[in-house]
């Protein structure tokens, strides 16, 4: 079945100078010692999407410590580590034709490198070299019969790892000095030890996440964490010299002793309503953004390794101009002048307040237990209405029941917590369980003072938790009704089948998906962090197209995908059995966000 190395090399040398289409004859399987090379798909011309190849090493040959590669969670961490090693090797080889896919600061479940019961596999994209439309056969032979096997050995032959230098294996890959833009996390030690540390950190982060859940906590920020980033367009940590490390207020400080022997101390946020206040530029949004990202594990050296947020936490913002299909936004908006029924709110062009209401109810539909809201990206009239305005505009002329009136019933009736940044208004003091003030990036617990200012005793707040209804417009539904869970929206059977002959959903970078002839804009979806997740969203839309039958609700389809992903991993999302391309697992929240922003979405009546 598989052919020896010399055959592929001599075929490629023989193809030198011939027309590009002749590359297709190299499809197949080849063997280089312990490395199996699969050429799955060959591009038809030099400008087409790259060819799809895989390299694979058996478990026996790879010889990784078995206890690191048994559980699914550990395999994700090891795969992530190997992906980083592979990128480092490629940059030292100065080999740009081979694309392995670059991870960022998070550890995500990806298709790029996978570990299964029989072996280790990397899925690669390779631009087969050409001059004009002529094959560069000698160069292709170098890439496929020298660099790819070297890469596979450097990544997968654990027994050959030496020291802390991924290129210092027995494979000859040190042709270029160490790159400055290393994608490896900062390691203190040798590569095999670094792998162990990587896996252990990931395990500890997951354990802490579970412990938070058991203790009814929604998030944690470790003392010493570096939350600010280097710049607005960078996800790397700010230089340690410039950043003020995080330090928990005493009242919220907790220490967790993890089973590995590691202890972590920091600020533990209980469920309920937390308001973050403080002067402009004092670090409020930075904390909220760190919590947003805390739904994903981070690599060592990121600064946010110990920022852990419960996994369903969802960032909610205003997003005027987005389309909305059949959302029940009546908990927040009623009696619109157009007499629109806001229990089935549909628009091609939502306003600031209606878009924020839609984002919120969609997050609940997708199972969010925590909402993260920043004043910087909120519609003021959605969030608050002050007393003079309540006096001037009668309730029956104001369609909006502001969030400040709903945030407590949301917690009391649906168990949904909120973390809110509000530096410009005291309106949330009365409904907050906790108020945290930031002063030059240092948080203080100012709950007691804030409650004194608005004349709320803790005991009143306790009572308001069980109070029947928050105030609202007279004929607006009460909180009891609006927050009783409903089955929700049911898309039509053809809702996700756009009339287009080509493959229907395709990711365009981080924040756009082409779906049939229309585009889904994900620019406002804050917790979409990696373009490979966007590819995952495109796959998820295709997957959901198969689920929707005119009877399945959005929430049911999301649950079905979650079950499948938990059972099969992210490979299960793609239809392709051999080489699925480069895809990362998105959360249910982001899958819902993509579906909800599709302008062609149609619901059954
Ligand atoms: P706010 O939302 O309170 O106006 P931001 O969170 O936007 O403030 O932060 C303002 C600036 O301060 C940003 O440039 C951010 O990078 C920086 N910053 C935030 N936290 C820290 C910190 N702990 N140490 C140093 N700089 C920080
Ligand atoms: Mg801000």
Image (cartoon, grey):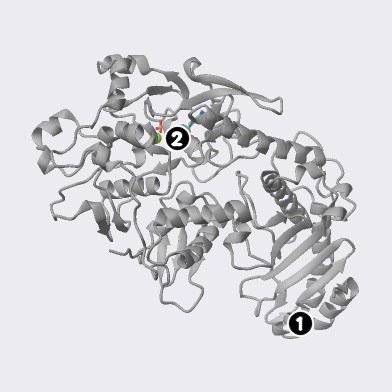
Residue labelled with disc 1: 25
Residue 508 seen anywhere in this rendered image of the structure? no
Number of labels in the image equals 2
Q: Is residue 543 visible?
A: yes
Where's ligand 2: which quadrant? top left
Instruction: Check the image and report above or below for 327 versus 433.
Output: below
Instruction: Please identify the quadrant where the N terminus is shown.
Output: bottom right
Mark 2 Cβ and ligand 1 under 8 Å apart: yes
In this view, 338 is above or below 282: below
Residue at disc 1, CB closer than 8 Å to ligand 1: no
- Within the image, what quadrant is residue 324 found in? bottom left
Which residue sits at x=65%, y=70%?
A: 50
Residue 244: where, in percent of width, then height? 54, 25
Q: Helix, strand or loop at disc 1?
A: helix
Say which label, 1 or 2, has the lower sequence index: 1
> For this view, does 202 lie left or right of residue 245?
right
Q: Residue at x 38, y 23 (%)?
A: 435
The residue indicated by pointer 2 is 288
The disc label shown at residue 324, or none: none
The image quadrant that residue 395 belongs to is top left
Quadrant of res 281:
top left
Residue at 74% over, 36% down: 197
The reply to whether discs 1 and 2 touch (Cβ–Cβ < 8 Å) is: no
- How far apart, in angstroms, are the residues tagged by discs 1 and 2? 54 Å
């Amino acid at each position: 079945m598989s052919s020896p190395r010399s055959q592929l090399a001599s075929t490629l040398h023989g193809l030198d100078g011939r027309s590009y289409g002749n590359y297709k004859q190299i499809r197949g399987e080849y063997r280089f010692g312990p490395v199996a090379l699969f050429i799955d798909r060959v591009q038809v011309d030099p400008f087409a999407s790259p060819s799809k190849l895989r390299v694979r090493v058996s478990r026996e040959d790879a010889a990784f410590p078995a206890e690191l590669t048994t559980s699914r969670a550990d395999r994700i961490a090891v795969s992530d580590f190997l992906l980083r090693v592979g990128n480092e090797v490629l940059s030292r080889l100065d080999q740009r034709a081979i694309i392995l896919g670059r991870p960022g600061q998070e550890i995500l479940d990806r298709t790029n490198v996978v570990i299964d019961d029989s072996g280790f596999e990397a899925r690669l994209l390779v631009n087969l070299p050409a001059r004009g439309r002529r094959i560069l056969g000698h160069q292709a032979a170098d890439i496929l019969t020298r660099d790819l096997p070297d890469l596979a050995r450097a990544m997968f032959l654990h027994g050959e790892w030496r020291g802390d230098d991924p290129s210092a294996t027995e494979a000859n890959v040190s042709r270029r000095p160490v790159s400055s833009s290393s994608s490896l996390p900062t390691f203190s030690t040798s590569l095999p030890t670094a792998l162990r540390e990587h896996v252990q950190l990931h395990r500890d982060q997951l354990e802490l996440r579970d412990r938070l859940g058991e203790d009814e906590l929604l998030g944690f920020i470790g003392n010493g964490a570096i939350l600010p980033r280097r710049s607005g367009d960078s996800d790397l940590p700010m230089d340690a010299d410039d950043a003020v490390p995080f330090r928990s207020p005493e009242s919220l400080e907790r220490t967790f002793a993890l089973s590995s022997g590691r202890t972590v101390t920091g600020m533990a946020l209980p469920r309920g309503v937390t308001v973050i206040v403080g002067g402009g530029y004092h670090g409020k949004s930075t904390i909220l953004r760190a919590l947003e990202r805390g739904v994903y594990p981070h690599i060592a050296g990121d600064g946010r390794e110990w920022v852990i947020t419960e996994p369903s936490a969802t960032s909610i913002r205003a997003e005027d101009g987005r389309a909305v299909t059949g959302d029940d936004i009546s908990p927040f908006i009623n009696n619109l002048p157009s007499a629109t029924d806001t229990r089935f709110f549909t628009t091609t062009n939502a306003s600031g307040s209606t878009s924020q209401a839609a984002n919120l109810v969609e997050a609940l539909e997708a199972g969010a237990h925590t909402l993260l809201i920043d004043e910087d990206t909120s519609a003021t009239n959605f969030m608050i209405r002050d007393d003079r305005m309540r006096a001037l505009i009668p309730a029956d002329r104001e369609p909006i029941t502001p969030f400040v009136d709903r945030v407590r019933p949301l917690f009391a009736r649906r168990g949904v917590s909120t973390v809110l940044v509000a530096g410009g208004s005291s309106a949330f003091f009365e409904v907050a369980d906790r108020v945290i003030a930031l002063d030059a990036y240092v948080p203080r617990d100012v709950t007691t003072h804030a409650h004194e200012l608005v004349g709320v005793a803790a005991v009143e707040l306790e009572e308001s938790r069980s109070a029947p209804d928050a105030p609202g417009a007279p004929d607006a539904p009460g909180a009891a009704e609006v927050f009783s869970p409903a089955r929700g929206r049911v898309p039509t059977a053809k809702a996700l089948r756009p009339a287009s002959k080509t493959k229907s959903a395709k990711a365009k970078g981080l924040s756009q998906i082409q779906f049939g002839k229309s585009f889904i804009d994900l620019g406002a979806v804050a917790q979409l962090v990696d373009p490979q997740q966007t590819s995952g969203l495109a796959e998820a839309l295709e997957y959901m197209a198969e689920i929707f039958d005119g009877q399945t609700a959005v929430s049911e389809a999301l649950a079905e995908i979650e079950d499948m992903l938990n059972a099969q991993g992210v490979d299960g999302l793609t239809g392709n059995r051999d080489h699925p391309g480069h895809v990362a697992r998105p959360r249910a929240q982001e899958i819902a966000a993509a579906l909800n922003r599709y302008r062609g979405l149609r619901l059954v009546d």
